[in-house]
């Protein structure tokens, strides 16, 4: 008997029971649903929630694979700085990938295992179908947390993020906060020493030599915050050959993912573009303050204020947040004008937090969560503004 037939038999066996959502989720994950709508007029389209989530995952996979190679490369480059002289020759190697697999793959497994487990439990208890929203969240979480995050800590954060960030609001489509960023915020506030953002962990797989198990060094944002010399070129920053979170280093791959999401009409180009504009404007303001000698080099804010505005766009998690987080269709603004305002404020506030909080020189996730809360308010005033304009036009025509 085929797997499809076995699953169909189990689905029929448990139809109408509490376990039905679990078997339906497994069945529709492997095969298309065999139910069709009847009667009335329906919009016929090939896209559905599961297909939408899969498209976003496809856009994230290159960032994940690159991050695995980068984890190993940063380790070996920290031991032997000469490897940085020929990055391309020393980057895509099996040794680098193996370290990435050892450290990143467990984060992915725990993220999906715990998150989907919670989703299944809530589906069975509440008697509704398993929602596909966590398919993307489960991939985002490993890409935005430090590579040395303990697995038990990640599991606790995932439970919190799924339950408090989504299920208490009614599940997928009802949440006001991005679940992945809710998980990141929980880790930041509950375990701040692990989430400081100023260091990167580098794994040492060669334990026979008696060397240390890990090497900690500053991330590029940490170097700017401490006003230290940055050894990475603009090419390294843009391509992603720098220390940082797993999926956030390669601006090139992130922009390719953005192009794919915009082409498939999954991501909003207005939000992406306006986020970069907002960050650039804030960066220019800080550069102007430095050029006007309003702040001195002795200030703890000088390092990041003096960073060129365009460098702010290609370092840290700004690009990743703008493309994959800010564009979440559930938590973002829905009106076109609102998307411009929403994205601009995310970029503007991100750089502000990055500069004024040297202890944690990365503020994009806090900025997005803040604007998630204000997104409905932005849309409300945009709609009210349109209503007032139409009323004025109506009065003019009547007169």
Image (tube, rainbow, N blue to C red):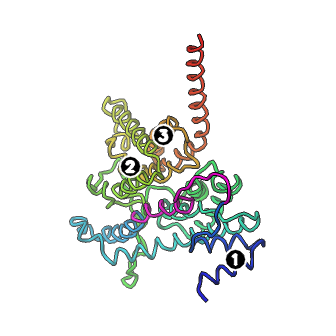
Q: Which residues are magenta?
A: 38-62
Local secondary structure at mark 1:
helix
Give the CA separation, mark 1 to mark 3.
49 Å
Q: Which residue is mark 2?
A: 226
**Dot 3, crowdedness within 10 Å: few (<14), some or many (≥20)?**
many
Q: Is residue 258 above or below residue 395?
A: below
Give the CA separation, mark 2 to mark 1.
59 Å
Residue at the extreme bottom: 1
- Relative image position of residue 22 (x, y in whole percent): 68, 72
Local secondary structure at mark 3:
helix
**Dot 1, crowdedness within 10 Å: few (<14), some or many (≥20)?**
many
The first of marks 2 and 3 along the sequence is 2
Name the residue nearer the viewer: 234 or 25: 25
Q: Is residue 310 left or right of residue 273?
A: left
Q: Which residue is mark 1?
A: 11
Q: Is residue 47 magenta?
A: yes
Residue 179 in view: yes
Q: Is label 2 in contact with label 1 (beta carbons under 8 Å)?
A: no
Instruction: Please tell me in which quadrant of the rendered image residue 49 appears.
Output: bottom right
């Amino acid at each position: 008997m085929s797997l499809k037939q076995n699953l169909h038999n189990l689905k029929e066996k448990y139809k109408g029971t509490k376990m039905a959502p679990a078997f339906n989720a497994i069945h529709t994950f492997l095969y298309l649903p065999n139910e069709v709508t009847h009667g009335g007029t329906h919009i016929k389209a090939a896209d559905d929630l599961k297909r939408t989530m899969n498209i976003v995952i496809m856009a994230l996979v290159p960032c994940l694979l690159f991050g695995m190679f980068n984890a190993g490369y940063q380790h070996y480059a920290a031991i032997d700085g000469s490897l940085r002289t020929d990055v391309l020759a020393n980057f895509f190697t099996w040794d680098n990938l193996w370290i990435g697999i050892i450290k990143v793959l467990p984060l992915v497994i725990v993220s999906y295992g715990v998150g989907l487990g919670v989703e299944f439990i809530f589906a069975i208890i509440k008697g509704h179908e398993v929602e596909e929203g966590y398919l993307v969240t489960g991939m985002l979480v490993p890409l935005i947390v430090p590579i040395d995050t303990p697995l038990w800590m990640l599991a606790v954060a995932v439970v919190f993020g799924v339950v408090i960030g989504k299920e208490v609001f009614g599940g997928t489509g009802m949440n006001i906060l991005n679940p992945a960023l809710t998980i990141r915020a929980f880790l930041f506030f509950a375990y701040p020493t692990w989430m400081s953002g100023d260091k990167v962990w580098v794994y040492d797989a060669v334990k026979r030599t008696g060397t240390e198990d890990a090497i900690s060094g500053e991330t590029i944002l940490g170097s700017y915050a401490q006003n230290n010399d940055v050894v990475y070129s603009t090419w390294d920053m843009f391509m992603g050959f720098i220390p940082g979170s797993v999926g956030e280093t390669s601006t090139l791959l992130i922009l390719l993912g953005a192009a794919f999401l915009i082409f498939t009409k999954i991501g909003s180009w207005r939000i992406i573009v306006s986020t970069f504009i907002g960050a650039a404007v804030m960066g220019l303001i800080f550069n102007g303050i430095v050029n006007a000698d309003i702040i001195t080099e002795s200030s703890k804010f000088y390092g990041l204020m003096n960073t060129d505005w365009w460098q702010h766009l290609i370092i840290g998690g700004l690009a990743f947040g703008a493309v994959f987080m800010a564009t979440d269709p559930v938590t973002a603004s829905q009106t076109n004008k609102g998307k411009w305002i929403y994205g601009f404020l995310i970029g503007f506030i991100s750089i502000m937090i990055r500069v004024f909080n040297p202890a944690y020189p990365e503020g994009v996730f806090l900025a997005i969560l803040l604007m998630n809360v204000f997104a409905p308010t932005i849309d409300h005033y945009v709609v009210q503004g349109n209503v007032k304009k139409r009323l004025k036009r109506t009065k003019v025509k009547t007169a």
